[in-house]
Amino acid sequence: MSLFEAILLGLLQGLTEFLPISSSAHLRIAGELTAAGDPGAAFTAVIQIGTEAAVLIYFRKDIWRIASAWLASFAPRARPEKSDVRMGWLIILGTLPIAVLGLLFKDLIEADLRNLYITATVLIVFGLLLGVADRVGRKQRTLDKLSWGHGLALGFAQAMALIPGVSRSGGTITAGLLLGYTREAAARYSFLLAVPAVLASGFYELYRYWHEFSADMAMPTIVAAVTAFVSGYVVIIGFLKLVSTRSYLVFVIYRVLLGGAIFALLATGTLSPL
């Protein structure tokens, strides 16, 4: 892999990881259409960790406050902020579905569900669902109104991203909007909920496929991870500003067009389903 290809893949990962358009679908297609090919699970894991580092930096105050309050809650005489302790437990609860389902259906996820016909279909279907949710959602609830039932439901919505094309943020945001949360609340919670899931998945995949790394892949991987971090950080800033004032319509249109383009490329033989 050349440094240019590494920058391209890192940029693609950073630009798509936090938007409701599915980074896994984009990386899958990019590997098919460029000379880079399949970058491998270890490479993908590292650049995912790079993008998640952007979340850790951007939300560092929130994450530190929630994590420290949750840990302090186990101390006998500590009096941590109850809302932060509760949010810590809600994030743990919301992470369980993707962890359990990811392990139970690991073989299916890594094989059959990577079929591009499935990817194209869910891009369109979940894009339309996002549009409906953005249109009919009441957009009144804030994160301090997040209930245990809603926390679990949003966790299952995040777990839908195990199917390439759904989008981790897209699934969570769609469910959040349908449950009546504001656009910004749904987006912020999708970022916080992704932290344990993405980091755990990234380091697990890195451990599993560490043997795939060769000496000539070290520099491209580092370059791609740094590119993913920088571009991801910029996207977080822009995305949160966008959703506070605008609808998700642009992402709905993009998903439908991308899904249609994949179907067309499959029909012409430019892309292979598996």
Image (cartoon, rainbow, N blue to C red):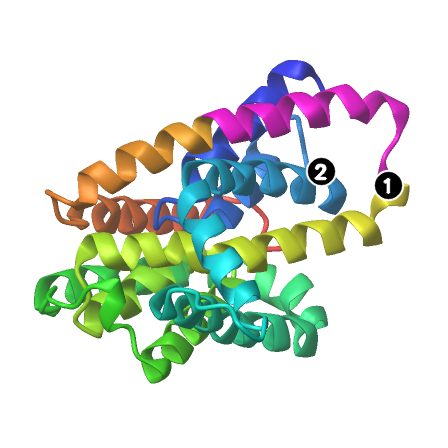
User: Which of the image's four quarters has the C terminus?
Assistant: bottom right
Which residues fall within the magenta stretch?
213-230
Separation of marks 2 and 1 at Cα, in angstroms: 9 Å
- Left or right of residue 219: residue 149: left
Residue 227 is one of the magenta-drawn residues: yes
214 in relation to 127, above or below: above
Which of the 4 image quadrants contains residue 139? bottom left
- Quarter of the rendering containing residue 5: top right
Q: Look at 48% across and 73% down and name the residue there.
A: 89
**Residue 167 in sight here:** no
Q: Residue at x 19, y 66 (%)?
A: 181
Q: Position of residue 168 (x, y in %)?
A: 44, 58
Location of residue 113 with respect to 48 vertically, above or below: below
Q: Which mark is residue 212?
A: 1
Tag 2 secondary structure: helix
Amino acid type at mark 2: Phe
Which numbered dot is residue 43? 2
Rendered view: 115 above or below 16: below
Measuring from the top left, give residue 204's x and y in whole percent. Answer: 74, 56
Is 37 part of what is drawn in magenta? no
Vertical placement of 179 versus 249: above or below?
A: below
Return the x and y of residue 6 as percentages of the image width and height. Answer: 63, 23
Helix or strand or loop: what does disc 1 sit on? helix
Circles 2 and 1 in contact, beta carbons < 8 Å: yes
Earlier residue among tags 2 and 1: 2
How crowded is the residue under tag 2: few (<14 C-alpha within 10 Å), some, or many (20+)?
A: many
